[in-house]
Amino acid sequence: QVQLVESGGGLVQAGGSLRLACAASGNIFSINAMGWYRQAPGKQRELVATITITSGGSTNYADSVKGRFTISRDNAKNTVYLQMNSLKPEDTAVYYCAAPKTPIPLDAGASSYHYWGQGTQVTISS
């Protein structure tokens, strides 16, 4: 089992920044990638960014966040971060951290992720 705990959400004005963190614990040795997803009210859960854990730190971003968000990792702390800059009201959502049970490609969809955190609310005011 793997446990994921997100932190860092909150309320900020448009143009502001937030940094989310996802701490992983448990049987993390099989994890090769982690991802951030978000879900706004009335909408489907969508990809935000993913990063490889085992080597290279390759990243993948949704077009809507490219150039504004940065995903990073600290393997020593078993933690993945999402730095969010130039935030927009449309970024308002619950943000979830996710990890697979078995190795997956960096561009794998949400159905490939087995473990999910409880989510953290991000609200951007205009």
Image (cartoon, rainbow, N blue to C red):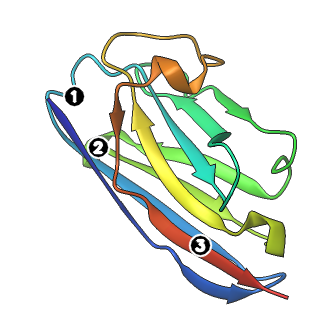
| Amino acid beneath label 3 | Val
Drawn side of residue 80 relative to residue 110, left or right: left
- SS at mark 3 in the image: strand
The residue that label 3 is drawn on is 122
Mark 1 and mark 3 lie on one chain; the one further toward the N terminus is: 1
| Amino acid beneath label 1 | Ile
In percent of width and height, residue 94 lies at 55, 62
Disc 3: CA contacts within 10 A as few (<14), some (14-19) or many (>=20): many
User: In the rendered image, which quarter is residue 75 located in?
Assistant: top left
Query: What is the C-alpha distance between the residues marked 1 and 3?
Result: 26 Å
The residue that label 2 is drawn on is 78
In percent of width and height, residue 4 lies at 28, 47
> In this picture, is 60 found above or below 106?
below
Drawn side of residue 29 relative to residue 34, left or right: left
Disc 2: CA contacts within 10 A as few (<14), some (14-19) or many (>=20): some
- SS at mark 1 in the image: loop
Task: Please give the label number shown on residue 28.
Answer: 1
Mark 3 and mark 2 lie on one chain; the one further toward the N terminus is: 2
Question: Which quadrant: the N terminus?
Answer: top left
Residues tagged 3 and 2 counted as in contact (Cβ below 8 A): no
User: In the rendered image, which quarter is residue 106 located in?
Assistant: top right
- The residue nearer to you, when weighing 61 against 112, is 112
Name the residue rendered at 45%, 66% in the picture: 120
Query: What is the C-alpha distance between the residues marked 3 and 2?
Result: 22 Å
Residues tagged 1 and 2 counted as in contact (Cβ below 8 A): yes
Q: Nearer the viewer, mark 1 or mark 3?
A: 3
- SS at mark 2 in the image: loop
